[in-house]
Amino acid sequence: MKRTLLLPLLLLVSSAFSQNKSLDVVATDAGKVSGYQAGDVHIYKGIPFAAPPVGDLRWRAPQPAKPWDGVKKCTEFAASPMQGKPDPFGVYTREFLIPYEPISEDCLYLNVWTAAKISTEKRPVLVYIYGGGFVSGGAGVPIYDGEAMAKKGIIFVVINYRVGIFGFFAHPELTKESPHHASGNYGLMDQLAALKWVKQNIAAFGGDPDRVTIAGQSAGSMSVNCLVASPLGKGLFNGAIAESGASFISPRGSGGLKEAEESGLKTATTLGVSSLAELRSKSAAELVGKGQSRPVIDGYVLPESIADIFNEHKQNDVPVLTGWNEDDAFVGPPKTAEDYKKMISTQYGADADELLKLYPAGSDQEAATSQTRINRDQIFGMQNYTWANIQSEKAKSKIYVYRFTRRLPATADFVKYGAFHTGEVAYAYDNLKFLNRPWEPVDQQLANTMSTYWANFAKTGNPNGKGVPTWPAYTASDNKIMILGEKPLAGPLPDKAALDFMVKRANGK
């Protein structure tokens, strides 16, 4: 009798195991998908996580993806979000940019890399959000490839979201038709929809829906900052990585819904239309490069300014890894020391002497360096520095801060860019192979160290682990950070006095 009962049970267990054994076909809530393999890594590209935001769905919250029958073949990147032609510029060669095509409003797709062998493994998940100033970018950029991180035990997901006018356009009629009386943050709502998809579906790919880290760089880092601040992000992630970007200190008088709506009305006038219906009837090509292109304090996705949300401890209190690069700046030809001093005197008035002590101009070369440092600290440094201080003083979760200082090996004109904006991304995700640079052994070592830190953080909320130098949590009292250069080491934050000056002045104190 016992043998008779045991046999069906063994068959049931065997059947369940065989169903989970292969990830060749994965069932999502909208239908089954298949991908392809690179060694032990399963790769799925172009999985729909929402309906195409076209026609009447333009400038609406993302809607559920339409279910499909059969198995959807997901082996190619889907279209990048609608934007201008992605031609190389400055230091940004093709490896930093989306493919030339396809580019379309129909863009709400994501990509998954997993080395899980069965769906019950519960591997930690990292969801990457690209930069591009909220006007460009996409999930198909070479340096966002997830194979290396998958090999480190991470389910790596890269998502698309609407950019430019398609993602961040506010208008009184849009606010009126919204059930939440808000408009302007469609790109952020896309990111939230993708995170909900991950929550509901990633277990089928071997991931743990309760161990999700969001990560991003530049506008992607600002997006991470918004998601941590947003009440709509609650329960969707357990950690945050923010590389060069946050929005604690905004230009005075910017970011509110009323201002964004007024900007939307001006855009409509410029386009020669007077109604929302006419705006939705415009072709995507007619709209590219027009209108609003930044997140809005809309009262819904962002109920208040990010600074107020954090100061009131209303944010999603999760561990954070954040930092910025030594040459995180966008500056033109530098001014001479004499012209630089004149500029500082004009712009800073009574504070000019103090600033020149912190950003000196003893020679033309020193003045050039100071101009880069000022630009870096104003755009990125003081934002992520403010996050570090607020988190360490008011949050329960820890924050880990870095400064990326490795000057990327280069030839010809690229030498001048140093540790430039976005330069750390290929190191953080162990993707140096996608960049055509004269790499040295120290670069491979740094990429392995950084990607190990990033993977450890995704796994535990702490970058520390076996084989990497100890990275102390940041506190406002000791200001210890990790310097990620030729030889990574912990130490005091460089430029603290300069950053304190910039933050104080920006806050009108």
Image (cartoon, grey):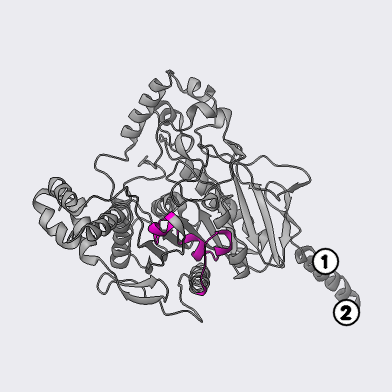
Q: Which mark is residue 476?
A: none
Disc 2 marks a residue whose amino acid type is Lys
**Which mark sits nearer the N-terminus, 2 or 1?**
2
Above or below — where is 325 with respect to 108? below
Q: Is residue 302 left or right of residue 454?
A: left
Which image quarter: residue 134?
top left
Which image quarter: residue 173?
top left
* Residue 436 part of the magenta-drawn span: yes
> 481 or 308, which lies in front?
481
Disc 1 marks a residue whose amino acid type is Ser
| Label 2 packing within 10 angstroms: few (<14), some (14-19), many (20+) | few
Q: CA distance from mark 2 to mark 1?
A: 20 Å
Counting from the top left corner in percent of width and height, residue 200 is at 61, 54
Q: Residue sitting at 52 percent across and 72 percent down?
A: 452
> 342 or 12, which lies in front?
342
SS type, badge 2: helix
Q: Is residue 260 left or right of residue 502?
A: right
* Residue 442 part of the magenta-drawn span: no
Which image quarter: residue 323?
bottom left
Q: Which residues are magenta?
A: 413-441
> 208 or 117, which lies in front?
117
Q: Identify the image quadrant of the N terminus.
A: bottom right
Residue at mark 1: 15
| Label 1 packing within 10 angstroms: few (<14), some (14-19), many (20+) | few
Q: Residue sitting at 64 percent across and 60 percent down?
A: 113
Above or below — where is 328 with respect to 258? below
Above or below — where is 401 with respect to 91? below
Outermost residue, left side: 350
SS type, badge 1: helix
Outermost residue, bottom side: 466
Residue at mark 2: 2
